[in-house]
Image (cartoon, rainbow, N blue to C red):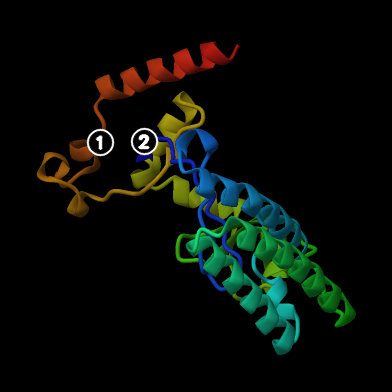
Amino acid sequence: MAGKQRRGKVHTDLHGGSPFDGLKQPFEEKDQILLAMNAVAVNVMARKRKADERWGLDRLAELVSEETRLRFWKQLSRCRLAYQARDVEGYRSACGGMIRAYDALEKEAESLGAEPVTVDVMEGQRDDGSVFGVAANADSAWAYSLQRPSVDVWTLEELAVILAAPVFTQAVRLKREIPGCEVMSIIVPDDVTPVFGGKSEGEYALSDKEILAMQKVGELSRKGKK
């Protein structure tokens, strides 16, 4: 359940749930053209992140006129076409236009009286592009839902209930023993191979021996950081 380290990609979307080109860490990428374009793309992602922090994930384009929104999407299309064509200079120019497009979106949103997201809620994005939020309490979740009706909002109390479910038992244990490990997917008995095809949690759970081995890995990891 707590899986291997994720490959060096940044899964950040621009608008409408369409994934932007994944960025790869330099030590994993030998393609110099792709590296050059990814280096440029980081500037766009930083500008997008700034807008998302103020207005909410992918919300800004919803707050402006149709004409401005269409120009924004066309500029995004120019970025993607240049990326697909492996045109570094064209991509650099398109990304510069993308940064200016975010400036224009914010300026228009402000002129139209749009309200930034003011409630302290952390946002995340699923692989399908949908956005979810995590609030400290029910009051914050309610206030945030009024601003972002398309986002499902969860409180810390609700997450505690979810994480107490048996399917998360080992993930919680591994999180404590191996800091930094991540949940990559959830496996249920009906979906796994016959080796783990039992009818109870104990029949497809990790053995105590396997857990002990993972604990030792965690201990070594912690010692290495001291």
Q: Rate crowding at label 2 as few (under 14), some (14 to 19) or many (20 or more) other CA atoms within 10 Å.
A: some
Q: Residue at x 52, y 48 (%)?
A: 33
Quadrant of the rendered image containing residue 174: top left
Q: Rate crowding at label 1 as few (under 14), some (14 to 19) or many (20 or more) other CA atoms within 10 Å.
A: some
Towards the viewer: 152 or 20: 20
Task: Give the residue pinned by disc 2.
Answer: 170
Q: Amino acid at mark 1?
A: Ala
Asked whether the residues under the numbered discs 1 and 2 touch, taking CB atoms below 8 Å apart as contact, a structural biologist would say yes
On the rendered structure, is 144 left or right of 128?
right
Q: Secondary structure at mark 2?
A: helix
Towards the viewer: 26 or 210: 26
Q: Amino acid at mark 2?
A: Gln
Q: Residue at x 46, y 33 (%)?
A: 181
Task: Give the residue pinned by disc 1.
Answer: 205
Q: Is residue 159 above or below residue 101?
A: above
Q: How many marks?
A: 2
Spot occupied by residue 138 in the image (x, y as percentages of width and height): 67, 61
Residue at the outermost bottom position: 66
Mark earlier in primary sequence (1, 2) = 2
Spot occupied by residue 53 in the image (x, y as percentages of width and height): 74, 58
Q: Is residue 14 above or below residue 113?
A: above
Please state, as top left, top right, bottom left or bottom right, where the N terminus lies in the image.
top left
| Distance of label 1 from label 2 (alpha carbons) | 8 Å
Q: Secondary structure at mark 1?
A: loop
Q: Residue at x 55, y 60 (%)?
A: 87
On the rendered structure, is 55 left or right of 159?
right
Residue at the outermost left position: 194
Quadrant of the rendered image containing residue 164: top left
Quadrant of the rendered image containing residue 113: bottom right
Q: Is residue 68 above or below residue 165?
A: below
